Image: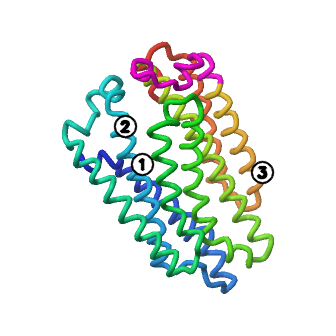
Amino acid sequence: MSLLRLIRLPNLLIVALTQYLLYYKIILSALQKNNIIPALEYHEFALLVFITILITAGGYIINDIVDLRIDRINKPNRVIIGKYIAHQTAYWLYFCINIFGFILSMFLAYAANRTTLLFLFPGAVAGLLLYSVKLKKQPLWGNLLVSFYCAGVAAIVWIAEQPTIEKLPSFQANIIIKILSFYAVFAFFSTLFREIVKDLEDAHGDAQEQARTIPVAWGEHTAKIIATISALFLLLSLIYAAFALRANLNFWGLIFIILVGILIVTSLLLLFKAKEKLNIII
């Protein structure tokens, strides 16, 4: 159970489910209707999803290793490394995941004859390591990087099947691109919003460890303003989705968009009403 908590199993399942839904329900469905063979075979796409999961799991492990002292201040009851899993074991897990993932990425690049996929794993791992060691303790840069990674969950699927998407009739290709773009933009700004809220929650421990996150370096008020801007972009992306996809949007899809918009506004109201850490957990 400690290992599953360390790698954030529910988050990994969400990543896998998101990629499978985007691939099978959006991209593959359109390709099959036009008798176009996908760039990746079924087992190759499954391998791509697994590599994405390994990247994400490794990022969680190294982040917990680097942030151990801060986590002992901000969330002592949720600390795993050093309490349930030894430091050395955590490092070995991180090392083994990266080696295994890199080997799989080389195999996938060779099997699919896609050189770009060869650089997927080492580039992503290097970025997450830089985030944990350096950028996370700088105002805004770490938040932006994590947000780009979450947007990349959809971008990876897009990149993998870009050659076949270009073969589709233009109107179908445009619909797919709009859906993938909407998801990537929404994932980016929702993650940015959540990351800033987390920085507000963890400001006390971050300040003690001299981590210059947005609330520590620029103040709580500025952090809330940036969070508000992120939330406004989220609302704009929902409006964009409603208009851009109106021809393909059914009643329940519209209701879902409205409910998500209400949740975003509610989160903003709770954020500005918050006066202490316990009040801003949303």
Q: Are marks 2 and 3 in contact (CB under 8 Å)?
A: no
Residue closest to the eye, 87 or 28:
87
From the image, tell me which residue sits under label 1: 59
Q: Earlier in the sequence, mark 3 or mark 1?
A: 1
| Residue pictured at 55% horizontal, 49% vertical | 150
- Which amino acid type is marked by label 3? Phe
Per the image, label 1 sits on a secondary structure element best described as helix
Q: Which residues are magenta?
A: 205-225
| CA gap, disc 2 and disc 1 | 11 Å
| Residue pictured at 56% horizontal, 36% vertical | 143
* Residue 33 image-quadrant placement: bottom right
From the image, tell me which residue sits under label 2: 66
Decide whether residue 66 is among the magenta residues.
no
Per the image, label 3 sits on a secondary structure element best described as helix
Q: Mark number for residue 243? A: 3
* Residue 279 image-quadrant placement: top left
Q: Is residue 89 above or below residue 209?
A: below
Q: Mark 1, residues whose alpha carbon is within 10 Å: few (<14), some, or many (≥20)?
A: many
- Which amino acid type is marked by label 1? Gly
Residue closest to the eye, 261 or 80:
80
Q: Mark number for residue 123? A: none
Q: Mark 3, residues whose alpha carbon is within 10 Å: few (<14), some, or many (≥20)?
A: few
Q: What colour scheme has been applied to the protein in the rendered image?
A: rainbow
Side (left or right) of 23 relative to 1:
right
Discs 2/3, front? 2
